[in-house]
């Protein structure tokens, strides 16, 4: 279901934070707000590109799969991030699928309005470019990890990348199933379970309910 959105909501989105009030009011007439239930496919690989999506709340996984159904998770996106911009820039079909991990709220901006906003607002254009560069760097880093780190190092690197600082401690506070970890680092679920158990036994991580506390010694080699 899609609904309209207020300029106040748009002001909280990093991509639009620098817009002057008048531009925000105009944008509010162009953007729609949409809810997505857990498991909803927002975009599918191979589909024509028609919109930009900005996440207000919830988490999404960006994934690819082969003809046999084997999945690889490229990224997990959350509030404030956006997706769908690449095809809007190069007019190519969707390169990956995006699926809601939990109930989510997002904003939708059509191709035509996205291109107009890019022309009318340099800060937005720079924000989109920064997002593309960040993802390219993350892809380079992931390729390097797959080539240079063993499974232990890849798990440690992923946990560090997913962690946030809570009361002075690095923690992964969002639920991160072992199956998803396996799909993100190119390993089996069984191997990930073994590595997580070894990291816990060795004192590198501590499980607190669904959260994972990371110790300083977990850092993989650079």
Image (cartoon, helix red, strand yellow):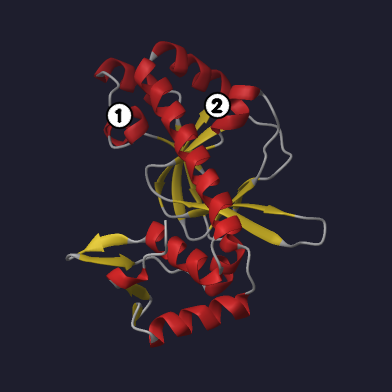
Numbered label attached to residue 25: none
Q: Nearer the viewer, residue 89 or 35?
A: 89
- Is residue 117 shown to the viewer in this render? yes
Who is closer to the viewer here, 168 or 10?
168
The percent position of residue 16, horizontal first and vertical second, equals 34, 28
- Local packing at callout 1 (Cα closer than 10 Å; few below 14, some 14-19, many 20+) is some
31 to 183, vertically: above or below:
above
Which element type, helix, strand or loop, lies under badge 1? helix
Q: Quadrant of the C terminus?
A: bottom left
Q: In which quadrant of the rendered view does residue 50 lie?
A: top right
| Residue annotated with mark 2 | 110
Picture coordinates of residue 93, whole percent (x, y): 71, 33
Alpha-carbon span between mark 1 and mark 2: 17 Å
Query: Which of the marked residues, 1 or 2, is nearer the chain's N terminus?
Result: 1
**Nearer to us in this view, 42 or 131:** 131
Quarter of the view holding residue 173: bottom left
Q: Is 31 above or below relative to 186?
A: above
The residue furthest top is 120
89 to 102, vertically: above or below: above
Q: Which residue shows up at 31% across the image and 67% down it? A: 171
The residue under label 1 is 7
Which element is circle 2 on? strand
Residue at the spot 38% in from the left edge and 26% down from the top edge = 28
């Amino acid at each position: 279901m899609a609904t309209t959105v207020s300029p106040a909501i748009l002001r909280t989105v990093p991509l639009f934070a620098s817009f002057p009030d008048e531009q925000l009011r105009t944008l509010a007439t162009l953007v729609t707000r949409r809810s997505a239930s857990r498991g909803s496919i927002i975009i599918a690989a191979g589909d024509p590109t028609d919109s930009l999506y900005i996440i207000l709340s919830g988490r999404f996984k960006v994934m690819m799969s082969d003809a046999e159904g084997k999945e690889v998770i490229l990224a997990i996106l959350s509030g404030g991030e956006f997706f769908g911009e690449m095809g809007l820039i190069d007019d190519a079909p969707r390169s990956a699928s995006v699926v809601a991990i939990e109930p989510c709220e997002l904003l939708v901006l059509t191709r035509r309005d996205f291109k107009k906003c890019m022309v009318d607002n340099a800060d937005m254009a720079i924000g989109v470019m920064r997002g593309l560069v960040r993802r390219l760097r993350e892809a380079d880093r992931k390729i390097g990890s797959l080539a240079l780190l063993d499974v232990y190092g890849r798990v440690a690197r992923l946990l560090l990348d997913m962690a946030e600082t809570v009361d002075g401690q690095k923690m992964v506070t969002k639920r991160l199933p072992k199956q998803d970890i396996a799909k993100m680092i190119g390993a089996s679920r069984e191997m990930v379970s073994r590595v997580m158990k070894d990291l816990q036994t060795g004192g590198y991580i501590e499980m607190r309910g669904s959260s994972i506390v990371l110790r300083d010694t977990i850092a993989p080699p650079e």
